[in-house]
Amino acid sequence: MSFVTLNDITKQYHMGDIIINANDKVSFDIEKGEFAIIVGPSGSGKTTVLNILGGMDTPTSGSFYVDGSKISGYNRKELIDYRRYDIGFIFQFYNLIPNLTAKENIELSTQTVQDYIPAVEILEKVGLTDRINNFPAQLSGGEQQRVAIARALAKKPKLLLCDEPTGALDYNTGKMILKLLQDTCRSDNMTVILVTHNTAICPMADRVIHMKSSKVSEIVVNEHPTPVEEIEW
Amino acid sequence: MKNAMLKNAFAEMRKTKSRFLSIFGIIAIGTGFFAGLLQSAPTMKESSDHYYDRTSLLDYRLVSTYGFDDNDIKAMKDGLSDVDIYPGYFTDAYVNTNAGEKKVARVYSLDNTGENNPYSSLQIIDGRLPEKENECVIDSSKMLTQYKVGDKLTLCGDEDTDIDDTLSVKEFTIVGKFESPMYISDVERGNTTIGSGSVYMLCYIPQSCFKTEVYTQVVITSDKLKEYNCYSDEYENARDELGERIQQIADSREQGRYDEITEEAQSKINDGQKELDEKKADAYKEIDDNEKKLSDAKKELDDAKVQLADGKAQLADSKKQLDDAKKQLDENEPVLADSKKQLDDSKKQLDDSKKLLDDTKAQLDSSKSQLDSSAQQLDDTKTQLDSTKNQLDSTSSQLDRAKSQLDSAKAQLDESKATLDATDKQLNDSQKDIDNSRAQINTAVAAGMMTSDEAAVKLAQLDAAQEQVNAGRAQYESGLAQYNAGLSAYEKSKAEYDAGYTQYSTAKAQYESGLARYNDGKAQYESGLDRYNDGKKQYEEGLVQYNEGKKQYEDGLAKYEKGKSEYDNGRKQYEDGLAKYNDGAAEYERNYASYEDGLKEYNDGVKKLSDAKSEADKEFADAQKEIDDNKKKLDDIEKPEWYLFTREDDPGYSEYGQNSERISNIAMVFPLFFVMVAALVCLTTMTRMVEEQRTQIGTLKALGYKNGSIMFKYMFYALTAAICGAVFGMLVGMKIFPAIIIKAYAMMYTIPDMLLPYDFVLMICTVAAAILLTAVTVYFSCSGILHDCPATLMRPKTPKSGKKILLERIGFIWNRLSFSHKVTMRNIFRYKRRMLMTIVGIAGCTALVLTGFGVYDSVNDIIQKQFGEISNYTGIVAYGDKQTDEQIAEIADKLAGYSCKGDKIYQKQITVASGKNSTDAYIFGAKDNDTITQFVTVKDRRTGEHYTVTDDGVIINKKLATLLGGIKKGDEITLSLSETKRVNAKVTEICENYAHHYVYITENLYKKLSGEDSLPYNCYFFNSDEGDDMPESDRDELANELMKIDGVMGVSFKTSVEGTFRTMLNSLLLVIIVLIVSAGALAFIVLYNLTNININERIREIASLKVLGFYDKEVSMYVFRETVILTLIGTVTGMVFGRFLVDFVVRTAEIDMVMFGRTVHPMSFLISGLITICFAVIVMLFMHRRLMKVDMVEALKSVE
């Protein structure tokens, strides 16, 4: 079995009498250490898949496995533990706690687990050694996203989930963030799943899952992913 | 344009119901409290005014030292045509309660003639008004529940108050119970000069029951004054104006009445002098007549004395004679008795002898008859014996004959025997031969030696021989049988003979023994006969002796009888003599006694006469003196004085007014607090709303809407909520709060009317205030955002940036905080406005709860302090001031029996005044300081220093000093010792006391001030060795025994007073409940609102935490930790603030009669803190559920 396996994941929302399928029998596998990209237009259900994968949402039907554990069917408490120990989440708008410094934001996350990378060390890794004691408002968008990545990585997750991490960033900064993610994937053998609507960055991924109208339309495996630096869009 | 905005606003209301309701709620509570409490005081006044007007409560009540006569009334009616004047009567009398106490009743006359008469406006609540002379109505106070309609009521007086002069009827049937606007206080019934000084019962009886010549009071009511509100200045001014007019009439009538009285008195004195002179002459003539009568009587008495002496001598002679006779008689008496005794002895001896003789005779006779019968028997025996002898002889000869016969028979038999034996032998031989022959034949036959014929011939021979033998044998056999029969006949005869012989031998022996007996008997008989003849001879000699003795005795008896009759005659003569003597002596005694009586009478007469004489002298001198005194008094006679009493002199009237003032004071403070909180809540809520709709505002601005029209939406939204809330709050609050307060006061005051009007001015003002308040807050929440340009607004609001707080610079504290505490501290200071609001809200809650408990503590404390520390006595015995020393000693004795001891005290309720202020207080007088301090502790409230009551001045309690306008040490106060006696006294110290007011005074000072020669003691305070632990049963017993002593009017124990007090103060619990409930509502709204906003503002932050895998508890703690800290800070602040609030409330809520304590117990701080925290915890639990439900996906959705 692959590191991540989704079998017929379906998510339905009820809007009054109408039933909306956000995901319709979505199935795919991702191997450990792969850099996977889920790509598709707005409303194609990619973020929903990511949320389900991150334990923030539950599928209406279907099952999925992470590292051999069946996550679908977890109860509330088990899902919290899953998020706490196994998942690192990166958002488009960083979602840092504005009232805490960069270091404190990371400590907020690491204080919940036993095995973690110290805040200073991880910030150094993302290249923010000199901004350790700055509040989010005092950081640029790229810096904030780097803090967010550092926060996600600090607790050594099994899975790094990124929801449009470059969506709010300019081209260069976005590239830099993608590079950081790709490097992390390669050097730490971290499994990264990234959601984007930008098809241009697909070549950098080991595996690209195309979604359209709540369904997986195509899965492409890149034998030779392109380094981020060489991608232009 | 406005329409679109309006639609938007309505849509907003529907969408955000909870926000709308929170503004509505806080405004409703704020205005409800504000308007409700503000309305309370006017409501109290309005209700009472309505009651007073409806029942025509008097405006003036006039009392005069001389009463009012018809001239006075006429002058008033002439001078005051625009008011109603009702002359009437009142008096104070005693009633006996069921408990056996004597209490004071104030009795008013009830005149049914006039219309609109204030008396007829008594509010009969049970039964009806009196219709007949022996009917009455009494007031419906709770103290009088023991009296029922239909019960009898007896009024009585005492030594001082003789109500016979005042009332013609004293026994009444209670036909109804009333409430009177004159007496709204439930406990106070005013003062009186008799008894304990306080009135216990009010009683109205028909006017015709009063005998008093002049009216004792005049009641004045004015319709014009009804137009004014009773507690208003307008009323007081108009009333004072009327008072001045009354005073003018009073001035002129006082002089007029004085003249009338003096003239009348002068003529009376003259009449009296004349009468005295006449009486004097008459009296002295009578005395002379009596003197003459007495000297006659004396002479008669002397004559009688001589006669009595003669009679006495005669009596003595008679007595001597009688004594001699008695002596002789006494001597004879034992001689006679001796003779009698001797005679009796002789008689007895004779009787004994006679009896003996008779016995002997009888014995002899029986012996004789025995002897005769023995002789006869002997003869019979002899005859028998002889015949027996003959028989025996014949028998003997018979026997001899039989013997010889027998012997011959024997010989015959023996011969027969021998013959038989020989025959037998012969036979046997013959047989043997035959047999042998036969055998030979047989052998021969066998041997053949003989032929059978031969044998047959031979055998035939043999058979014939055999036949012969057989015949011989038969002959033998019969011979033998004959022999045997003969032998047995012989033997039988032989046995008969032997038996006959034996019989004969026995009979012979019997005969011989019988013969011997006969011979013995014969000898005995002969000796018996000899003895009989001797006895007979002796008897005859004894009989001769007895006859001689008997003759002697009869002679002696005759002699004795003669002597006896002589003696009896003598005795009878003596007794007759003695009876006669006794009669004589008794007569003498009688005569002597009547002589003595006569003498005594005479002596008395002499004394009486001299007494009468001196008495007459004295009486006439006294009468003369009285006349002289009256003459003098006439010169001293005082002018009558009229006293004007207003409604303020009615017990409870002004106190009720003051109470309503207090309520309005409190009404100002509490609601302000609520309004402040309401404003803060409103502001935060609206700010949040505006910020949430930041983008929308930006869009509108971009579309060209003006700031005004954008703000209109928010104004409309908030104002709709505020106005609805205000109207709702007022409608409810203005009904509920005044009703609660009036109900609370109904425990102390009887105001049956309750008006709960909506005061429109107040309502409009309140709504206006609510509108203004909301508008200002909306303006402030919008103004900032509206100044930004649309572009900025379209972008999400830059989250409030974090920054270092001051605390971080204090390294040694900051570094010690855990990570989560650091976060909390930073969050607290991030939202300063919210921090402030939370603290204010929580502090307000704690303060309100603390106020509730504090007020309760203050009240509870005074009970402990008053009855534990200050009042040290165990009980009081009340008695009339005419109690004799003996009766007081009896009280002391009874008390000593229960290990109680005490002392006399003068305690009476009087009016104390200083300048314009006046109030009721107890004057507490005793011999000296030691006596007073035995029963009460006179000390300073703060320092605890004990004061001494001196002859220099009085000591009053703190509250009294305050009520009298802040009296200080050294100031003077006016004491109304009685209605007409007012004196000034210096205040030497001000002491601690909580319940009622006291003026402590020494006997010396009282005498000096009043001019009286003693303190009119009216009660006896006592202390038990057991203190307040004295058992209930002992108390009852003691009280019963004390009540039996004459003059004792009542016995009361401190503990029962304490009990009543406690019940009364329980009404305060209601206030506490109101406070706690409103505090709860306040805390809840503030905390809920703030936490809600907090969560809304930080929803992304919370969602992020959840994504990071924070457990529910961790998420809640992240948010609540700051709430907890702020709650704690707020609680502590609230305690400080509440402490001041308690002081304020206690000061304003105090009633005049009582001074509350000023301390709040630590326990109350603790409880109010806990209650607040409890409210906070409830809110947090609510919010915890909300936090659990926060949807991460929704919250973190990318901002559009």
Image (cartoon, helix red, strand yellow):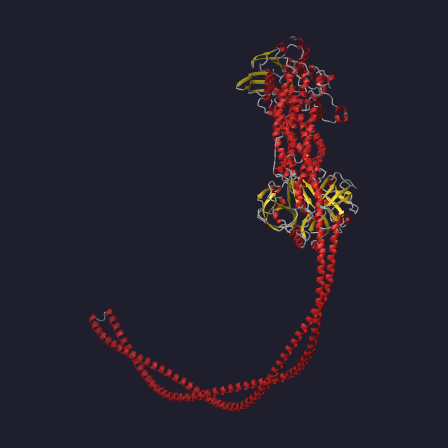
- Does B375 appear above or below A75? below
- Does B801 appear above or below B1184? above
- Does B579 appear above or below B801? below
Asked where in the image residue B63 lies, by quadrant, the reply is top right
Q: Is residue B1126 left or right of B361 when viewed as pictured?
A: right
In this view, the residue in front, B392 or B683, is B683
Q: Locate residue B375, reporting x and y percent.
A: 44, 89
Q: Locate residue A232, reporting x and y percent.
A: 65, 8
In this view, the residue in front, B501 or B944, is B944
Residue at image position (26%, 78%) is B475
Where does the C terminus of chain B fall, quadrant-wise?
top right
Q: Is residue B290 visible?
A: yes
Q: Locate residue B552, reporting x and y percent.
A: 56, 89
Where does the N terminus of chain B fall, quadrant-wise?
top right
- Does B370 appear above or below B191? below
Asked where in the image residue A205 lies, by quadrant, the reply is top right
**Number of marks in the rendered image:** 0
Residue extending furthest toward the left: B453
Q: Is residue B179 left or right of B821 when viewed as pictured?
A: left
In this view, the residue in front, A46 or B1152, is B1152
Q: Locate residue B299, reporting x and y percent.
A: 71, 73
Q: Is residue B652 visible?
A: no
